[in-house]
Image: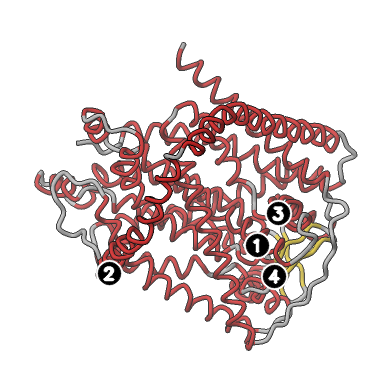
Amino acid sequence: MRRQTFSFRQTASWLLSFLLLAGVLALFFQYRHGLPVIRPHLNVQLSNLPYYAFCSFYRMLAAYIVSLIFAVSYGLAAARSRRNERILIPAIDIAQSVPVVGFFPAAIYFFVALAGGSRVGVELAAIFLIFTSQAWNLALGVYEAIKTIPVDSLEALDSFGVTGWMRLKRLYLPASVPKLVYNSILSWVAGWYFLIACEIIAVGPAHYKLPGLGSFLMEAADKGRSGELVAGLITLLVIIVLMDVLVWQPLSIWAQKFRYEFAASESAGTTQIYDLIASLGVNVRRHMRALIHPLTLAFARLTRSAPAQWLGALAQRIARPARIVTIAALVALVVYGLGDGLVALVRMLRGPWPADARMIPAAAGASIVRLMIAYAISLAWTLPCTLVASDNPRLDRLIAPLAEIAGSMPATALFPVIVLFVIRLTGDMNLASVLLILTGMQWYLLFNLLAGARQVPADLKEAARSFGLRRFATWRKVTVPALSPSLVTGSITAWGGGWNALILSEYFIYRGHHYEVLGLGALLDRATYETGNGTMILLSLLSMVLIVMGLNRLLWRPLYNYATQTFRVDY
């Protein structure tokens, strides 16, 4: 009976999350009228390329910092409380199913319109859109890392009475480091992949374009300027390689310190660059303490005075009523906004619906078939590749940088190849669409599987070999079961990335020609970039969200709960 009650509550939380999301989206589309219309012009010259690269990089960095803070907070809240989990996990599953273009109205209304169409507003909107391509994967990685902490570690801290900040510092954050590092690489890959959509924001006539690598590549591809397109891709490649050498490889080595072992590991160690940073941090902290100490003494003397004590007592009396009034005002504001959104949702869904709405069921079916084919292809090569890499350290060190470079290439880079070799040779857009979906789906699986493989204790593999198990038997008995939580997490994020990739794979423009195929992505793109029909955009987005909700509720979440409970590594 208890199990049925929990299932009912979980289903209710999913439906409530969907209803609230639908109301928020409807609220944005209700206010889409009256937005400033801009017809920007981007100068595609090689001399501007360094400046464009700098602009894209600082947007990516700003979005990543916000995503990291969000992911740690959100993942901790979801993993440490069953009540929070029932609310937060359905919400993030729904959020990651919304393509980047689905957040355009929110970006335009909140940032662009409120800033009067200024550059600052558009910059904030672009950073927000990049955040939506980075944050969900990071948050799910933190959630998985904390949910799979061995029970013995939790019981050890409980026996010593460790709670609060010390528990966070000594267990939760160290346990999340490997997933955060590898999922950070994946988040940057996704950010680069969707950079074009994040730097060119359009809803019908409202059109905004920021100087950056994404807009440069799109402009070069649209005008058929192959030289500028190649130069932009080379610039992007240089940034990716430098990031890998200077940031991700040292961080990956450092993250090995935090994996679970039954015995001490000799392979994990800090790199010289992190030893240098640590020494600098100690010196900086010592000098800062010397500077701040006189100020703290002066502040302590001031607070011990009679007027200060009287003011402190007065502030304590005012604090509680002020907090109650503030919380009540915020709750009233949220309730009013959601109520307005639900009214807008009913008004928009009441009709009249556009003629393209009749194509949604067939388009949804076609998109699901393409996603299933792309997922099957992704799984067919990423899982064997991960298993081989788990026994081959040299391949393991090589595969992640190559995957990072390949996954960061925007879909625009593939347009000439797709047009010249796939569409013209086969005469069919469906194969081209599957290939483009593949580029937005397979890396989520690969990076999650690699991160999971690196978390498998080496002692388990040694124990399997000592019992005479050969390589395939070790994979089947040890590695694949230990990879199961990462496989399910990678599958969830891969399908989320696949839904996002639909906006680039089912509808694209190359040299002035439109290439599209029946699918939800094509319907959404046409409504977003051509007609600006808010009802059609809303219907397309809600169709995607409903499909993803059904898959996650009926397939992925039960699989994830089974994997984390059955195959968690315990001492």
State the CA–CA distance, disc 4 to disc 3.
Answer: 14 Å
Query: Which residue matches tag 1?
Result: 198
- Labels 2 and 1 touching (C-beta < 8 A): no
Q: Measure how far apart labels 1 and 4 are at the Cα level.
A: 9 Å
**Vertical side of 118 occupied by 373: above or below:** above
Residue shown at the point (26%, 39%) measured from the top left: 569
Mark nearest the camera among 1 and 3 is 3
Q: CA distance from mark 2 to mark 1?
A: 36 Å
Circle 4 residues within 10 Å: few <14, some 14–19, many ≥20: many
Query: Counting residues from the N terminus, which is met first, the one under dot 2 or under dot 1?
Result: 1
Q: Residue 68 placed where, x, y %?
A: 47, 53
Whichever of callouts 4 and 2 sits on the residue coming sooner in the sequence is 4
CB atoms at circles 4 and 2 under 8 Å apart?
no
Q: Please, which residue is most extreme toward the right here?
A: 352
| Residue on which disc 4 sits | 210
Q: Which mark is on residue 276? A: 2
Q: CA distance from mark 3 to mark 2?
A: 40 Å
Which sits earlier in the primary sequence, circle 1 or circle 3? 3
Q: Residues within 10 Å of mark 1 (few under 14, many from 20)?
A: many
Q: Residue sitting at 67 percent across and 66 percent down? A: 199
Q: Which amino acid does the dot numbered 4 rest on?
A: Leu
Q: Earlier in the sequence, mark 1 or mark 4?
A: 1
* Residue type highlighted by circle 1: Cys
Residue 89 is situated, as x and y percent measured from the top left of the image, at: 52, 36
